[in-house]
Image (cartoon, rainbow, N blue to C red):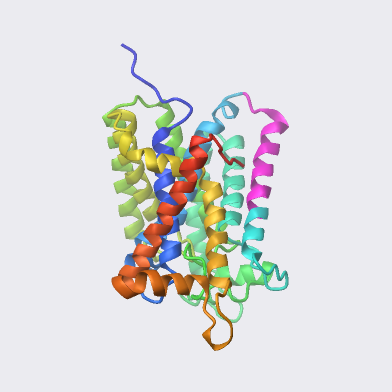
Amino acid sequence: MLEPKLSLRLTSLDVFRGITIAGMILVNQAGLADEVYQPLLHSEWNGCTPTDLVFPFFLFIVGVAMAFSLAKHTKGNRGGGSIYWRVGRRCCLLFALGLLLNGFPTYNFSTIRVMGVLQRIGLAYLLAALVVLNLPRRGQWILAALLLVGYWVAMSFVPVPGYGIDHLTRSGNLGAYIDRLIIGTQHLYRLDSFNSMGDPEGLFGTLSATATVLAGYFSGEWLRIQPVKSRTSLGLVLSGIGCLLAGWVWGETFPINKKLWTSSYVLFTAGWALLLLATCYELIEVRRLRRWGKPFEIMGLNAIFVFIASVVAIKILINTYVRTGNRATTIYAWVYEHLFLPWAGAKNGSLLFAIVTVLFWWLILYGMYRQRWFVKI
């Protein structure tokens, strides 16, 4: 009897993507309040909170999806220039959308942040795709290891002009220096950034972020050739535990740090991504328990749309005022202070506001799903 194999569309991956996008909306909205539960905030510097998992999960998912979308171009049939055009076009679109998002609503190009979440996703996707399309499997693994080890060596041992080896501080690390030198991001590491996904998404750190995409790709490639069985889920779990332990151990000498996207952070977050993917895979693909995941699948099918739309909505909420003069207050502050704070308190109010926001976007995405409207890049 033939063992079942995966189709080209992995429903559990859509559910994983939906869980991640729901988490992003939740932490972005909750993070606007003055008082927030700690798990909904980023680590100030070293360490990892649940919020710090959101962005690497996106990159990991990009890698898993790449294993399916590029499958026919990695075995003899390279697809010629058309596949490179498609990859380059997607990277450019993501980068352009990220710039538009960073500049909204004022578009002051003298102060606009060049890098951002979508920009990093686009660049890391491009670099990982070039690796996948041009190197054999062994070469891909070797390059991924070199990215992690080389990034550690560069960040830990290369002196920074004016700082020396400054022990990975905010402004004294090599990544910050290179970003300032190339794109003039003098305030790259400030803590007051609006985006709860975290600042920065600098240029140099994109190298280690590419390793996150490749980790997802290796996982997707493995899934493609495995039978749809619980032992496949177990393989993901064991790999996830291994990455968690490796990241934790490495973190003793090269701290787990999202803002620097350290090599230990890559391994540690890849471990959690593998565990969540294993859970979704086991429940949906193996046990065929799909009903629980349908709400998340609906969100995952229009992830790029809701990512952009939700960030635009947040910027409108915090930049539009409902009063003038001394009584001026933003729409966000008015809604929070009148509808949530009085009866729920500060922390619970911010959490409930965030949950309502997630439900609001789910209703919009459900309407789009019913109409079969899917926004793709």
Of 281 and 163, which appears nearest the observer? 281
Residue 212 against residue 369 in the figure, above or below: below
Q: On the picture, is 227 further left or further right than 107? A: left
Question: Which quadrant of the figure contains the C terminus?
Answer: top right
Of 223 and 58, which appears nearest the observer? 58
Region of the chain picked out in magenta, as a range: 77-95
Q: Main secondary structure of the magenta part?
A: helix
Residue located farthest toward the bottom when viewing the structure as drawn: 326
Q: On the picture, is 292 further left or further right than 322? A: left
Number of dots carrying numbers: 0
Of 238 and 159, which appears nearest the observer? 238
| Position in image of residue 186 (x %, y %) | 62, 76
Which residue occupies 60% across, 72% down? Answer: 177
Q: Is residue 240 magenta?
A: no
| Position in image of residue 342 (x %, y %) | 33, 75
Residue 143 against residue 103 in the figure, above or below: above
Question: Which quadrant of the figure contains the N terminus?
Answer: top left
| Position in image of residue 149 (x %, y %) | 47, 55
Q: Is residue 86 magenta?
A: yes
| Position in image of residue 8 (x %, y %) | 48, 27
Q: Is residue 275 visible?
A: yes
Which residue occupies 31% across, 39% down? Answer: 292
Residue 312 against residue 45 in the figure, above or below: above
Which residue occupies 39% across, 54% down? Answer: 269
Of 141 and 310, which appears nearest the observer? 310
Which residue occupies 46% across, 33% down? Answer: 221
Q: Is residue 48 visible?
A: no
